[in-house]
Image: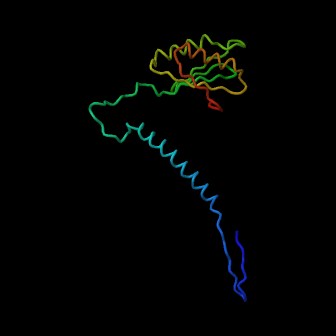
């Protein structure tokens, strides 16, 4: 609290007392936060043992990525049928009448698995106007075709 005392004449004595409790609270929270984050930083530094800039030794040979593992593979579920994008190749599987041709999709997926046996991941993209049961049918065909890592893309990827 601050209060003013008149000393006589034009001189005034101002006594100010600072409330240190909020400052101590803030400092204690900061110290606890720093202690907790220091522990997690130390743990993450321990786990980062192998980096790109570490010395290469003969005991740890470099692992080469499997060929064609990073080739983009996407199945689009459209109003007109299925559309497969593998690399730059595009395969269209139109509807047969009003039904989606799931057998033809599975056949094409198995052909792709024969060409790229190490490929495991695939992206399934769809528009909001397509019924979800057809997206699930495409996912089932991909799982049956040997692609266990199925990801559903949100938004427009088509």
Pick whichever, 156 or 137, lies toward us: 137
Point out residue 36 in the picture as x, y percentages from the top left corner.
52, 44
Q: Say which residue appears at 68% left-offset and 20% top-offset.
A: 80
* Up/down of 126 relative to 110, above or below: below
Point out residue 79 in the picture as x, y percentages from the top left corner.
70, 22
Q: Is residue 62 left or right of residue 30?
A: left
Can you say which quadrant of the picture contains the N terminus? bottom right
Q: In which quarter of the image is residue 61?
A: top left
* Up/down of 150 relative to 98, above or below: below
Q: Quadrant of residue 43?
A: top left
Pick whichever, 105 or 92, lies toward us: 105
Q: How is the image coloured?
A: rainbow
Q: Give the residue furthest to the left.
A: 58
Pick whichever, 34 or 124, lies toward us: 34
Point out residue 64 in the picture as x, y percentages from the top left corner.
37, 28
Q: Say which residue appears at 49% left-offset and 16% top-offset.
A: 113
Point out residue 25 in the picture as x, y percentages from the top left corner.
61, 54
Can you say which quadrant of the picture contains the C terminus? top right
Pick whichever, 96 or 53, lies toward us: 53
Q: Give the residue furthest to the bottom.
A: 9
Q: Quadrant of residue 136?
A: top right
Q: Say which residue appears at 31% left-offset and 40% top-offset.
A: 55
């Amino acid at each position: 609290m601050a209060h003013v005392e008149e000393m006589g004449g034009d001189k005034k004595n101002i006594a100010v007392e600072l409330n240190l409790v909020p400052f101590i609270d803030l400092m204690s929270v900061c110290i606890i936060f720093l202690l907790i984050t220091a522990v997690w930083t130390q743990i993450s530094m321990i786990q980062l043992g192998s980096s790109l800039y570490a010395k290469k030794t003969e005991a740890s040979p470099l692992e080469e990525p499997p060929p064609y593992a990073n080739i983009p593979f996407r199945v689009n579920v459209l109003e007109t049928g299925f559309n497969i994008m593998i690399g730059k190749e595009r395969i269209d599987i139109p509807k047969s009448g009003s039904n989606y041709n799931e057998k033809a999709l599975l056949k094409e997926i198995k052909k792709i698995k024969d060409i790229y046996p190490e490929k495991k991941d695939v992206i399934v993209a769809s528009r909001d106007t397509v019924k979800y049961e057809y997206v699930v049918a495409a996912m089932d065909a991909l799982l049956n075709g040997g692609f266990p890592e199925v990801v559903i893309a949100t938004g427009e990827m088509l």
